Image (cartoon, rainbow, N blue to C red):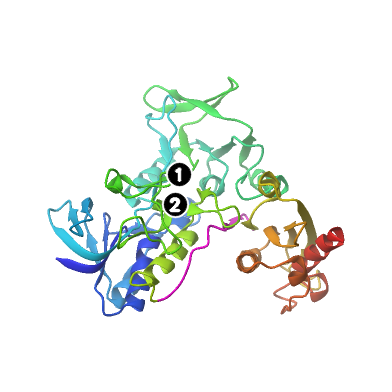
Amino acid sequence: MKKEILIIGGGPAGIITATTAKKTYPEKTVAVVRKEETGLVPCGIPYIFGTLNSVDANIMGIKPAEKLGVEFVIDEVTAVDFERKTVLLKSGDSIEYEKLVFATGSRPVLPPIEGKELKGVFTVAKNKEYMEEVFNFAKNAKRVIIVGGGFIGIEVGDEIRKMGKEVTIIEAMPHLLPAAFDEEFGKIAEEKLTEHGATIKTNLRVSKILGNESVTGVEFEDGSNLTADMVIFAIGYKPNTGLVQNLGIHLGYSGAIWVDEYMRTSVRDVFAVGDCAEHKDFFTRKPSRLMLASTAVFDARVAGANLYHLKVVRENHGNLGVFSTSIEGLTLGAAGMTERTACAEGFECVIGEAKSVDRHPGTLPDKSPLYVKLVFSKESGLLLGAQIAGGKSVGEMINILGLGLQMGITANDLVTMQIGTHPLLTSAPTTYPLVLAAESAIMKLR
């Protein structure tokens, strides 16, 4: 069997690589090999517990890809021969290719600590069967500990709390969401979670999981302990690169597959996208460990369009990091560098801040307060990062700032940008928080 374009992995990166390739090169045959017939929407996994109350309600569809002519092969790749341009499948079949794309994703990290094998200890995986086991166990649990206060940790914790469980979220750093937000925004998230019944413990590291056959709690490095009958680790992911070990393909510093700006690997006609590919930070060019479905899809659109002779030139200039999350009506968004990381990288920064409401006048119903923090380079006025807390409008506001960061906008650009406003949709033109925050920074740049 031969498929001109073959993708290994059927998550968001794999599917979008396939659809982009089929749109760009409609005359080519395109196939995706993936282990499971049914895949989960990665970002929707936390919501299986409370909001959706079902794993089956969080299924990633493939019909649009199939309508384009993409073929899905439900099997597992066991070996790859780069010289013969062939992959071997667990079923015994083989597939020849012209262009090969690794979209093998990542797997959750479980630290090497005592008790990790006990019944009731889980991670947050992207596998449907595994997450059904986690979901069913959570139904009967009473006290649940979430280890990790990043996006996945707080979202899973908040959703399990909605099931009527006693939830404690443990974070090793001084505040929640430390990778994407400065302390004041982490505290806003903590206050919202606490207000709705979760317990938050920061500056604590788990050293041991307690129990005999089943988990009974955790012990911390300071010697204290906490009772629980379920522990979920949400401390990050590592790239799935087992297939390429010892094949001569170059791996990056993070252990992911090295790629150039067109997602090409060190092996001719072989590409890598998503969590299994190594990325560089947009600003520093250092290796980035950022793993997001949105980033994976961006990779996929670059790779899918550039498989043959750079027919459509799209480049990946590095991971910017555009985040958003929602907790009990509070939306948090971040893009680029935090004040903390910018200073640590040697930037001399100026901060612009503003508070407003997302309706005008502020007496309108369903209004939400907005808090905007922008990080600029003192030397150039270049925008380096943004953080926003507020209502649902934050989700798209942070996307606009993400584009601005990619385009290299400055504080002056934000102050002079032309905006569309409406009483029921936005802040007033006189108090638009992005403009006010940029203005406050310009006052400090003078």
Residue at horizontal 36 percent and vertical 77 percent from the top: 24
Task: From this view, report whether residue 89 is shown above or below residue 98.
Answer: above
Q: Is residue 317 magenta?
A: yes
The x and y percentages for residue 166 are: 55, 38
Task: From this view, report whether residue 107 is shown above or below residue 173.
Answer: below
Q: Quadrant of residue 224?
A: top right
Identified by mark 2, the residue type is: Glu
Return the residue found at the far top: 223
Q: Is residue 146 visible to us here?
A: yes
In-front residue for pair 137/89: 89
Q: Which mark is residue 278?
A: 2
Q: Which residue is mark 1?
A: 253
The x and y percentages for residue 422 are: 73, 79
The x and y percentages for residue 244 are: 29, 48
Q: Earlier in the sequence, mark 2 or mark 1?
A: 1
- Determine contact: label 2, label 1, CB under 8 Å: yes
The image shows a total of numbered marks equal to: 2
- Secondary structure beneath dot 2 equals loop
Task: From this view, report whether residue 7 is shown above or below residue 254.
Answer: below
Please state the extent of the stretch shown in magenta in the rendering.
312-329
Task: From this view, report whether residue 113 is shown above or below residue 321.
Answer: above
In-front residue for pair 427/293: 293
Q: State the CA–CA distance, disc 2 to disc 1.
A: 8 Å
Q: Main secondary structure of the magenta part?
A: loop
Residue at horizontal 52 percent and vertical 41 percent from the top: 165
